[in-house]
Image: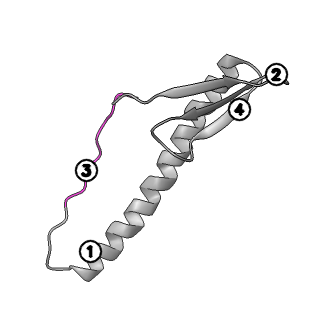
Amino acid sequence: MKLTAVFSPEEEGGYIAYIEEMPGVNTQGETLEEARSNLLEALTMVMEVRRKMAQKGISSVKKGFSKRKIITEEISLGV
């Protein structure tokens, strides 16, 4: 899976950065390298939160459909 990182230089200095395909993953940095590093950290944090939210949703689905089999597994996206 490939994602698009967008970096926009600011007039006052530094960069604003975000992941085009993932709303909510955005940050900034004084340098392009710092913005890139911060963006990867933001992506990791957002994915962790979304994973926890999904697990809560799966738990409630399991309670509502106790007779239905639900399979969950981790996948690697090479990120």
Q: Secondary structure at mark 3?
A: loop
Asked if residue 11 is among those painted magenta in the image, a careful observer would answer: no
Label ID, residue 73: 3
Magenta stretch prevailing secondary structure: loop
Sequence order check: which comes first, mark 2 or mark 3?
2
Name the amino acid type tagged 4. Answer: Gln
Residue farthest front in this picture? 11
Q: Which residue is mark 1?
A: 62
Q: Position of residue 10 (x, y in %)?
A: 77, 25
Q: Which label sits in the foreground, 2 or 3?
A: 2
Residue that mark 4 sits on: 28
**1 or 4: tag closer to the N-terminus:** 4
Disc 4 is placed on an element classified as strand
**Mark pair 3, 4: CA separation:** 33 Å
Q: Which labelled disc corresponds to residue 13?
A: 2
Q: Earlier in the sequence, mark 3 or mark 4?
A: 4
Report how far apart the C-alphas of labels 2 and 3 lie in the structure.
43 Å
Percent coordinates x, y for residue 19 in the rendering: 52, 35
> With respect to residue 23, does 69 lie above or below?
below
